[in-house]
Image (cartoon, rainbow, N blue to C red):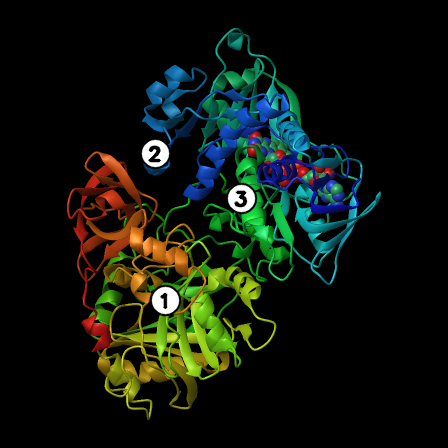
Amino acid sequence: MRNHVQVAVIGGGVVGASVLYHLTKAGWKDVLLIERAELTSGSTWHAAGGMHTVNGDPNVAKLQQYTIELYKEIEAISGVSCGVHITGGLMLAGTPERVDWLRMAVARGRYLGMDLQLISAAEAKKIYPLLEEKHFLGAILDPIEGHVDPYGVTHAYAKSAQLAGAEIVRQNRVIDTRQRADGSWDVVTGKGTVHAEHVVNAGGLWAREVGRFVGLELPILAMEHQYFITEDLPELKGQKELLHVIDFEAEIYMRQERQGMLLGTYERAGVPWSPRTTPWDFGQDLLPNDLERIAPSVTVAFEHFPRLESAGIKKVVNGPFTFAPDGNPLVGPVKGLKNYWVACGVMAGFSQGGGVGLSLANWMVEGDPGADIWAMDVARYGDWANRPYTNAKVRENYSRRFRIRFPNEELEAARPLRTTPIYEKLQAENAVFGDYCTLEHPLWFAPRGTPAHEDTTFRRSNAHPHVAEECRAVREACGLVEISNYGKFEITGPGAAAWLAKIMACKVPAVGRIALSPMLNERGRLIGDFTLCRVAEERFFVVGTYAAEVFYLRWFEKQLPPTGVAVRPCAMEYLGLSVAGPESRAVLQKLVDHDLSTAAFPFMSFAPMDVGLVPALVGRVSFTGEMGYELWVTAEYLRALYDLLHEAGRAHGLRNFGGRALNSLRLEKSFGNWAREFRPIYGPYEAGLGRFVHLDKPDFIGRSAAAAEKASGGVRKLITLAVDAKDADASGDEPIWHGDKVVGWVTSGGYGHTTGKSIALGYVDKAVAGESSGFAVELMGERRAADRSEGALVDPQGVRMRA
Ligand SMILES: Cc1cc2nc3c(=O)[nH]c(=O)nc-3n(C[C@H](O)[C@H](O)[C@H](O)COP(=O)(O)OP(=O)(O)OC[C@H]3O[C@@H](n4cnc5c(N)ncnc54)[C@H](O)[C@@H]3O)c2cc1C
């Protein structure tokens, strides 16, 4: 074993092997993989090897396509067979809601270049004679699905990497990782210590334990997972191999295994495995079968595929594999640990392993994953994702694997957890709450005497008329919304202004002013959008997206100078309320000595003020597009502030509103959101944020790339569409058509209650970005005509917010 390497990859499952291969492919050849036992000794060896391209996140779906296409390449390089069987696949729907879901999946597939076809149950029966047609209403036919040999794939990656210069050491456990002062690592193994510049934790079933060497508690948990293989079915002999099948109602997947059928479940009563610590002596072991647990699914499967019942079971496999709380992988550099990378929590190694390896290797070698992998970024979880949280959410996710997640659905596990001091007050007002990184926040308010409950649906829900009332109050009088769930940072020090000038694209505001700012990476892509409020010469209060707090901190940490600037996250220390609407100034003026007239405190002003007895930071800004104020207070004052504003607002028609109304109001203003309109695949000019980019500043990160984007016009453009929808609005990821071509995708959508229009924001190709007509959005399988709006649908000149 070498004693010094550029990268030490810990773990020789399919993921570690893929990372190793991709590092060599990207040009880093001095790389070493250390495996505790033999390659595939974790989850990999007993996997069913199924693979498919469909994923809830389109960017992950693209990486799944990449993974499947990669098998030819590694077979050719290594000469090792991956045992690829591309059988095609069927996803079977048994309810009208699931048919709606299939339509959405087919629509999404269009801009991802996937060839998904919606077919009838009768057509499915023709292709798949084992199914009982009466139980189904339709299906998706996907030509690119199938299965591989897990052992073959892992060895093909490994051999390809070795041929390029990588070393693999087997039967050698890593027992510690220790960081040196220069940020490099001593990787302590049973066979000695290796000095590595970078460490990759690809420990799979043991990734948690490997993380604990450095005090890291990764939010992953293994679940037991069972599949069985039936005795041979004589009628399969000599026939073309049957397709891979997902039956959503039975919650099973199934494929042919030689002459028998392999059937696996994601049962509702799923059981975690080794919830605290994975034993090091667990090897190529299986867990005891528990067919009772999967009986409810299997019973339905036998009704849906009657031939299976008489087939007899030849073999049962029960093995553990790991999940993150949302079921997507954890990939990337870890905040606070220089040169420490993770590639774990990969629950579908044979669909995702290639994409994970590619993104991580790009990130390490090029400094950027090369694709939008926000959905897999380890930084999407904060400290709130502790072990009990992970346990509750992973179990929920596992049990829901084949269930529909409606666009307006809030999941229940691990709730309520974090609440603000006005939670009970909002509850008393009949708030329907949503969960945001474990913090409860009001979505809308149900009328008194009715259940505080929203029906889950692809169409407009029972919330619709009540959200309309909330929007009306904001546009015509005054509304109050809790905004505690925003991310907040305090940036202080003599070097703060200069540092912000370097990392933000905007002009740094003067004391008492606010600036909206995109944050760019070196490639000029959007990695954040912030509201910069300058409290004093050396003190800034910066507001962004709470879900991206760790993601931002990781970037800030990389850019911080050794002295002169301090960044402090303070999201839960400062809670907030926003009052918005034409009466908002009158309401607030009753409570403060400050002159709030536009002359004295114009749009984008910021100042500390006493609001009654409550010391607050007040900004004149609102995400509703109306005249409005955001008020930030330390948590202990929130309750008093809420009461004061309500008291003062009573005569002005002030009422509570929630996140649903805020979304409707911001859509009417064409205001974008992080992780929707603003993501690392878009540039600021494409996203319509060009006016906040100050190219005349001497230098800032991403400046030259942004200048190039401005000159070229980028490759796509964010536009606003008013869709001729029926009873379902866009919610994101629907294709946008122009004429007969799919030219883009929706980033967010909803109903604009003031305009009475269904609105979609989305990106379209530059070639059609100048067109004023001819657009359509595919909703529920139908192309609905959409009117291009040149600016925002409400107050395009922004007069109201400046009034
Ligand atoms: C029953 C079952 C069926 C499945 N079916 C499918 C399927 O059809 N399709 C699909 O895509 N996925 C399937 N999976 C999931 C799939 O197995 C995983 O996604 C995949 O194996 C994860 O690979 P990994 O490399 O991350 O982890 P692992 O396979 O767990 O690999 C981790 C490796 O790291 C090594 N290691 C850990 N700690 C150390 C250390 N300290 N020192 C040295 N080495 C260490 C381990 O020995 C192990 O070899 C299934 C899983 C199970 C259990």
Viewer-nearest of discs 3 and 1: 3
The residue tagged 1 is 430
The vertical placement of 101 against 473, above or below, is: above
Amino acid type for the residue under numbered disc 1: Asn
Crowd around label 2: few <14 · some 14–19 · many ≥20 (10 Å): many
The residue tagged 2 is 106
> Is 710 left or right of 617, judged from the image as shown?
left
Crowd around label 1: few <14 · some 14–19 · many ≥20 (10 Å): many
- Residue at horizontal 58%, vertical 15%? 258
Amino acid type for the residue under numbered disc 3: Ser
The vertical placement of 760 against 35, above or below, is: below
Q: Which quarter of the frame holds ligand 1? A: top right
Tell me how far mark 3 sits from mark 1, CA to CA.
Answer: 45 Å
**To which quarter of the image does residue 133 belong?**
top left
Q: Residue 752 in the image: state x and y as whole percent.
A: 23, 58
Amino acid type for the residue under numbered disc 2: Val
